[in-house]
Every structure is written in C-alpha cells, then in structure tokens.
Image: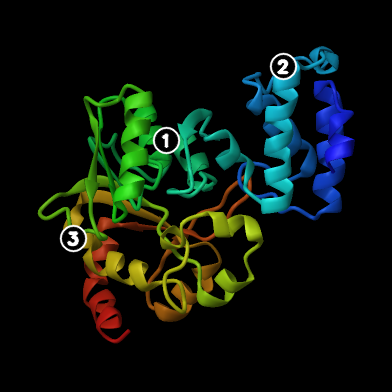
Amino acid sequence: MTASLSRLRTLRDHIRWAVSRFQAEQLFFGHGTDNAWDDARQLVLGALHLPWEMSDSYLDCRLELDECEHLQNLLRRRIEERVPTAYLLGQAWFCGLPFIVDERVLIPRSPIGELIEHRFEPWLPDTPTRILDLCTGSGCIGIACAYEFLAAEVVLADLSFDAIEVANRNIEHHGLEDRVYTVQSDGFDGLPNQRFDLIVSNPPYVDAEDFDDMPDEFHHEPPLGLACGEDGLDLVRRMLAQAADHLTDDGILIVEVGNSQVHVQALYPEVDFTWLEFSCGGHGVFLLAAQQCRKHQALFRARLAGS
C-alpha cells in the first residue's frame, strides 16, 4: 500500500485510489455516506479543509508533500482500522450543519433530521417553547431544533459525561449558549418536574443480535450509545413509562428505535403508535401525543415492571 500511495499526487489521484481500495476492502458506508465515491471525496477534501461543493476542475491540483502524508495516513486508518470518515475528520454534518464528533459520541445519521427540516409538520400543534433532546450524544438533534425554533429553550440530556462534553463544545461552536444547555441524566431521572412541548430521542436501541452482527466501523462508536439489552428496549421501556410526566398537555414524543420497531410492536400491541415515513430513507421512528402517553402510562409501567 505504501508504494502505491507514494505515487499519488493530485486530489483526483487520491480520490480514485481511495474508491478502488474502499471497494476492494469492502468497507462499510453508513456514517454520513452510502457509497465509496462519496466517502472518498468527503475524506480527501475534508482532510485538506476544502469544500465538498468545490468544482471538479480543482481536482487535478497537485498536493504538497506534507498534505500527501497527512491524507495518506488518514486513508490507511480508514482502510486498515475501519475508522469512520467522520471520526478521522472530527466533523459530521446533520441538517446542513457541521458538528464536532469523536469516538465519545455516535456519528449523526438519524432520519429525525428530515422531521426537523420540516419543523415536525403536521404533528406539532403549536410552535414549541421547550424542547428536550434525550440521549443527545453530540447534541446534533437538539441544536438543529434550536435553529428551526428560534425562540425555544432546548435541553440536551445524556447519561454519558463524555457525550455532554462534546455536546457543550457544539453548543459553543454554534453560539447557542443563551438558550441551549446540557443536563447529565439517566433517561428522565435528571429532569424532575420538567415538562416539554417536544421530546425527541435517538436512544440506544440495537438488540443483542444486531449488535453482534454490526460491521467493524460501528465498533469505533461508544457501545453505550448503541446497545440496550436483549431486545434493544431497556431504555425505551423506561422512557415510555415516564414520558407522560414530562410532556405538556399538547406535547409530542418522537423516538427512533430502528430495527427494534418489531420489538416495540410485539411488546405494545395495544398502543396505536404513529410510525413516521421518510422520503430520504430511514425507518423505525414512532410518535406519541401526550394524551396517548397518559392513556397508556399504566400499561407502559406494567410492561416495565415485568421486564
């Protein structure tokens, strides 16, 4: 690999070589890109602080030797260690916004971003004044909500102190310290007596079988943000049992459970979840209104007690 890398001189050389090697080594793409070309272009341009939308006419520019060395080191790590590109660059994009990321937090990729860009229409009856991003990780969901709802107070909550540190960096990076703040909390436990018009959560939900089968790239992410019990619902059960106590009268709860949708439906067949659809891909996101959370709270608590 070293000999072939040493002959690469232009941006185009590096992108072309990376695409070939990424495909030959059967890398996994699912942390912001879904194919070798986009992943290679993102890594090569991002490593040199060049814009994604840069004209292809610049791809034949020759690189300085130190630029080649830096870029080729990142390419080796992407291939040999299976480190996702976002971690190599220290940055990921969500809802058109840049976020600081490292291996303390998941890489942003939730389909909830599409809901945010549409301001949760038609589900929100009124413009929210208080929003909770539960299991916030990097803070991307809550911060993106703050951009859409300019008068809202937004709370970013997470059990992980490491994740809270990253979220705080992103709050500062986006200049939102006046109305976005973090709380260290295990589920709702650190938020006593607080109610919200909108609660959005991308909690850990990967079941044991799926976690064991995940590609190597996922094992660079914190397990605390991915796996959550045999059926993936250990935390979701608790959230459902407590959500009614933290929603305003017309509030809504939106939770991503991915492939664990089948477990949710099997566990709560009596509950009329609204399973949201996405034009840009994604699945396993449900919505419950506050009145539904109240109606089924006894059921949710019973299933939690019996788990």
Q: Which disc number belongs to residue 272?
A: none
Q: What element does badge 3 sit on?
A: loop
Q: Quadrant of residue 36?
A: top right
Q: Position of residue 227 (x, y in %)?
A: 46, 67
Asked if 74 appears above or below 229 in the picture, the reply is above
Whether residue 148 can be seen here? yes
Closest to the observer, 42 or 132: 42
Q: CA distance from mark 2 to mark 3?
A: 46 Å
Disc 3 residue type? Asp
- In the rendered image, the quadrant that contains the N terminus is top right
Q: CA distance from mark 1 to mark 2?
A: 30 Å
Q: Position of residue 118 (x, y in %)?
A: 47, 35
Q: Quadrant of residue 304?
A: bottom left
Residue at 29% x, 87% y is 306
Q: Which disc number belongs to residue 119?
A: 1
Disc 2 residue type? Met
Q: Which disc number belongs to residue 189?
A: 3
